[in-house]
Amino acid sequence: MSVLQRFEKRLEGLVEGAFAKVFKGVVHPVEILNAMQREAEAHKAILAGGRTLVPNRYVIDLSPYDHSRLAPYAAALAQELAQSQAEFIGEQGWTVYGDVIVEIERGDGLDTGMFRVTAEVYTGGEVAPQAAPDPYGGYNQGGGYGPGAGGPGGPARNVRLVSGDGRSYPLSIGSTVIGRGDQANMRLPDVGISRRHARLDFDGAQVVLTDLGSTNGTMVNGQRVSAVALNPGDMIQLGTTTLTYRVDG
């Protein structure tokens, strides 16, 4: 069974028999996966030792109509796309940095049935040079060369999230994914949180929180948000977990 066939079979289970109804009249996920495979092929780079590096982060922009129709399945669909893309990359014998990541976003200005795929090599905060020699020595379980522990970028002083039970999560410059899955930089053991629930982007001065199509949504100060710049003292709600944004000093 091919990658595409396995992907279609998992999709049928994902929407519990409503497959044809859900995807009728909107962009089909198989078309998205095909485009992701083409992007990987188009962005191949040869590393030291003859390994072939391809992008591991794929951002899918959907038309407003398609995005609204697929919103209930966005988190699960992103996970299935990531798994199938990882299978495809593995079958080709290619290399990625870390895990394959898929983010589904609303693409204002796109007509119904249209979508856009953006691919990049993502190392947890910085885009690695496509043809750079491989700086990492170990091969991780995800099938790629990981940038190691410690989260994206370098440690950022005085900027952190504090949970209700007092645990502190310092933020680093770059992007930090919050979730309960292996792809998350900040893992929270909360069943109400998606595997890749939200992303924090910190440029050294400002932190922007973006929901990644999570099942239960992301709340800031009691309001559901898609993307918002955080202010000190803001209360972030993900599942049953509350985090307070703190800037010290």
Image (spheres, rainbow, N blue to C red):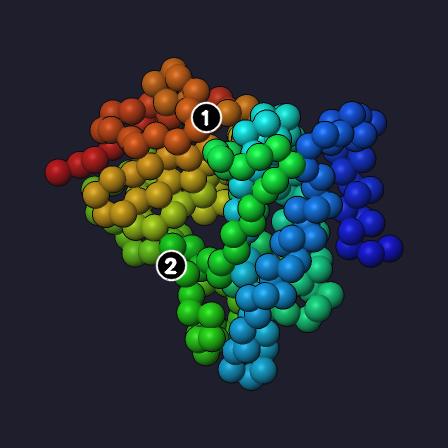
Count the marks.
2
- For residue 20, side relative to residue 67 (left or right): right
Q: Position of residue 165 (x, y in %)?
A: 37, 27
**Farthest residue, direction bottom:** 49
Q: Is residue 183 above or below residue 166?
A: below
Res 163 → quadrant: top left
User: The C terminus appears in which quarter of the rendering?
Assistant: top left
**Measuring 70% from the left and 46% from the top, which residue is drawn there?**
31
In the depicted view, which residue is nearer to us: 108 or 40? 108
Q: Secondary structure at mark 2?
A: loop
Going by the numbered disc 1, the residue's amino acid type is Thr
Residue of label 2:
126
Residue at which label 1 appears: 218
Residue 248 position within the rendered picture, expressed as x and y whole percent measured from the top left: 17, 36
Residue at 30% across, 50% down = 173
**Viewer-closest of 112 and 157:** 112
Which mark is drawn over residue 191? none
Question: In the picture provided, is 35 more to the left or to the right than 3?
Answer: left
The image quarter containing residue 232 is: top left
Question: Of marks 1 and 2, which one's residue comes earlier in the chain?
Answer: 2
Q: Residue at x 47, y 70 (%)?
A: 130
Query: Is there any visible trace of residue 83 in the rendered image?
Result: no
Determine the secondary structure under disc 1: strand
Q: Residues within 10 Å of mark 2 (few under 14, many from 20)?
A: few
Q: CA distance from mark 1 to mark 2?
A: 25 Å
Q: Name the quadrant of the N terminus.
A: bottom right
Image coordinates for residue 243, horizontal then vertical, percent = 36, 28
State whether residue 81 is above or below residue 224: below
Image point 24% across, 28% down: which residue? 231
Locate residue 52: give its quadrant: bottom right
Residue 64 visible from this viewpoint: yes
The amino acid marked with disc number 2 is: Glu
